[in-house]
Image (cartoon, grey):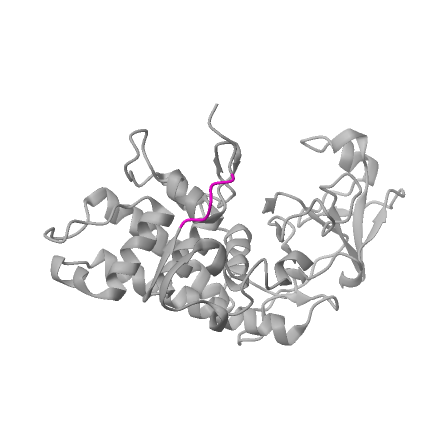
Amino acid sequence: MRYSSLIIVTGLANWALAAGPAMSDRFTVSSTCDTAKLDAVLTDAITLTNNAVAALQALIGFKGWLFSSTGTGSFASAAEAAFGVGVPDTLSFGYSVKDKTQLQNALDNYKILQNALVSGIKLNPARHWLFCDSSKLQWTTARLPPFHISHQLLQITIEQFFANSKPKPVKGVKGLWKDPEHKIGTQYIFVRDEYNGGPICGPKAAEGITFQAAGTMFLCPKAWVPTNYKQTLSALPRTGRTTWDDVRNLPGVFIHEMMHMLPIKPHITDEYYRGDRAYGQLRTLNLGLDTDGFPNANPTCLTNADSYHVFATIAYLTSAKVVPEEDKAKPAS
């Protein structure tokens, strides 16, 4: 889930890129997180991303005889489920120009993700924050002295900030969440409220929430429940027939949120299918179909964050047959 919120600070800092496999090299990590578990998520997300890059490269270079291999077959199934690219006929000589363009655009986006996760490009713990619980944040509606908004040098009061906000705060709520643990320079960090004063990781919240403009990500407690998401790649079923509900995973959720976070153009959001966000294999698959039910390489698939979770997971499970979960979307009107 993405929100176009802002971090509000009163000072700027010099940013320095860091490298390494630890999540703390990519984000300033809240004390609400288990750092060992986060590092494991990062490691598995890198594995999924590297495999996704290799899979898309194989598909773009596809020749008919390659399709007989199990790996290429799972890659093609993943591309249909995530990006609306139909599986080629076994006698074909490859994908159409339109389908190859779709695959190449997906590959370009994964490479941006790969560079961020592996090398820290576009990520910096001095301007990116990761929380695993919102309990440390403090809700405030108090008048504050003038502050900077994001990297702008314009000084305004909190009242002016809300008066100028678009869209306006829900039901007149005018408050911010203060992070008392972290600062930029001497100034506290604030995150704009999206839940009408309710906790950001509260009952109404999603498993993952990203405030892209603020550089802030939440992997809320729901994401850390094994019955909701497999916590590691080693927990995934590797063979046989399985459903998406059995293979959706926390490293994939992190990939989803990272696609919101990174400055990819066009911006990757949560697209909608039948009035609900296109989460999960079934909805991402339907997002890529035309009105007659055939894959049509819909560009909207490329701007849907969960499509990257779906492709990376199915392409990784080369010896498993992943079928869509039950459709819980609203019926078409």
Measuring from the top left, give residue 325's x and y in whole percent: 45, 48
Residue furthest to the front in view is 241
Look at the picture and state if 14 lies above or below 172.
below
Is residue 171 visible in the rendered image? The answer is yes
Q: Which residues are magenta?
A: 324-328
Q: Residue at x 70, y 68 (%)?
A: 33
- Camera-side residue of 24 and 14: 24
Depth order, front residue of 327/35: 327
Query: Is residue 119 in sight in this rendering?
Result: no
Q: Residue pushed farthest top? A: 333
- Indicate the position of residue 159 as horizontal and vertical percent values: 83, 36
Question: Is 127 contained in the magenta span?
Answer: no
Q: Residue at x 44, y 42 (%)?
A: 283
Query: Residue 317 lies in what quarter of the image?
Result: bottom left
Q: Position of residue 37 (x, y in %)?
A: 62, 72
Check the image and report above or below for 267 versus 23: above
Q: Position of residue 106 (x, y in %)?
A: 36, 52
Q: Is residue 224 left or right of residue 274?
A: right
310, 9: nearer the viewer: 310
Q: Quadrant of residue 29?
A: bottom right
Residue at image point 40% right, 39% down: 300
Compared across the picture, whether 59 is left or right of 66 comes to right
Most extreme residue toward the right, as rendered?
Answer: 142
Q: Is residue 325 left or right of residue 77?
A: right
Predominant secondary structure in magenta?
loop
Q: Give the residue drawn at x 52%, y 64%.
A: 251
Image position of 22 (left or right of 53): right
Does the magenta run of residues contain 327?
A: yes
| Quadrant hosting residue 222 | bottom right
